[in-house]
């Protein structure tokens, strides 16, 4: 529950767990920011801080399109046909950061994020590792999606409660104004009637006014 309530803890846990399990030299978790419509890093390890924070991918980028269609890890090999499908800026970014694998995070047939993985320190990355990584990525995507939905629901309820409080405050203010306005109206009418009796008495007339 702690990880769902605080997505930042979940992001860090996913990155830490994968790095410890596979001993990646570097790893970055990027999630789709719905407001900006960009995939941005939310947690990373091993990458230079400035490089990781500057990572940005658009849903229309070739890398995201390939991951969305294939829903499988993309191995970064400069001499492969798949790599040539990427745009030059995407190629430059992946090579500069030393990314070896791009893993999609898919939930409900939507790509909600991706993992950028550097080389492993211990050994060669085997097909068995790839299968395990894909399975873990699926579970991570589900957990991340649930955390996002929880936060959206919490924000929705908070806005609803705030709207209800504002409506209640408005009703209260309206009621108070009504309770003040009624006697003021009665007082004003009475003063206007009394003023007729003091037309020739300036002092009392001024007092009534």
Image (cartoon, rainbow, N blue to C red):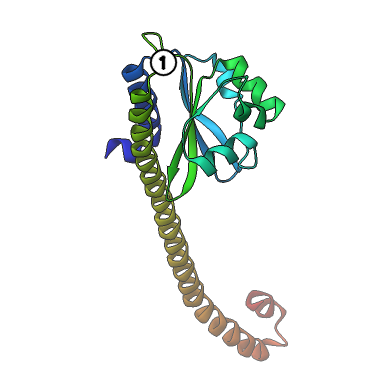
* Picture residue at 46% right of the left edge, 66% below the top: 167
Relative to residue 131, is residue 32 depicted above or below? below
Q: In this view, does 36 lie above or below 100?
A: below
Q: In which quarter of the image is residue 122?
A: top left
In this image, 6 relative to 36: left or right? left
Residue 177 in sight here: yes
Q: Under tag 1, what secondary structure?
A: loop
Q: Name the image quarter holding the N terminus.
A: top left
In the rendered image, residue 161, in percent from the top left (x then y), is placed at: 40, 59
Badge 1: few (under 14), some or many (20 or more) residues near its Cα, within 10 Å? many
Q: Position of residue 83 (x, y in %)?
A: 62, 26
Find residue 26 and report its horizontal and vertical position in percent.
Answer: 46, 16
Residue at image point 50% right, 72% down: 174
Residue 182 position, x and y percent, is 51, 81
Q: Nearer the viewer, residue 193 or 70?
A: 70
- The residue closer to the viewer here, 203 or 27, is 27
Q: Which residue lies furthest to the top in this view?
A: 122
Residue 5 at least partly seen? no
Residue 59 lies left or right of residue 46; in this view the side is right
What is the quadrant of residue 2 in the picture?
top left
Q: Is residue 103 above or below residue 150?
A: above
Rendering quarter of residue 142: top left
Q: How many marks?
A: 1
- If the image is split into quadrants, where does the C terminus sit? bottom right
Residue marked by disc 1 = 24
The residue positioned 56% from the left and 36% from the top of the image is 39
């Amino acid at each position: 529950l702690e990880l769902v309530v605080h997505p930042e803890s979940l992001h860090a846990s996913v990155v830490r767990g994968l790095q410890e399990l596979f001993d990646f030299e570097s790893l970055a978790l990027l999630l789709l920011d719905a407001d900006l419509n960009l995939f941005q890093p939310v947690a990373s390890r091993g990458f230079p801080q400035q490089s990781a924070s500057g990572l940005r991918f658009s849903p229309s980028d070739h890398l995201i399109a390939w991951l969305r269609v294939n829903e499988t890890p993309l191995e970064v090999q400069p001499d492969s046909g798949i790599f040539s499908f990427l745009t030059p800026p995407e190629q430059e970014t992946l090579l500069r950061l030393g990314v070896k694998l791009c893993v999609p995070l898919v939930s409900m047939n939507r790509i909600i994020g991706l993992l950028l993985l550097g080389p492993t320190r211990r050994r060669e990355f085997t097909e068995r590792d790839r299968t395990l990584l894909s399975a873990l990525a699926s579970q991570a995507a589900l957990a991340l999606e649930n955390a996002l939905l929880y936060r959206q629901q919490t924000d929705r309820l908070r806005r609803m409660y705030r709207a209800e409080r504002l409506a209640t405050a408005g009703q209260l203010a309206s009621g108070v104004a009504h309770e003040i306005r009624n006697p003021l109206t009665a007082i004003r009418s009475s003063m206007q009637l009394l003023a007729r009796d003091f037309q020739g008495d300036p002092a009392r007339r001024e007092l009534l006014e």
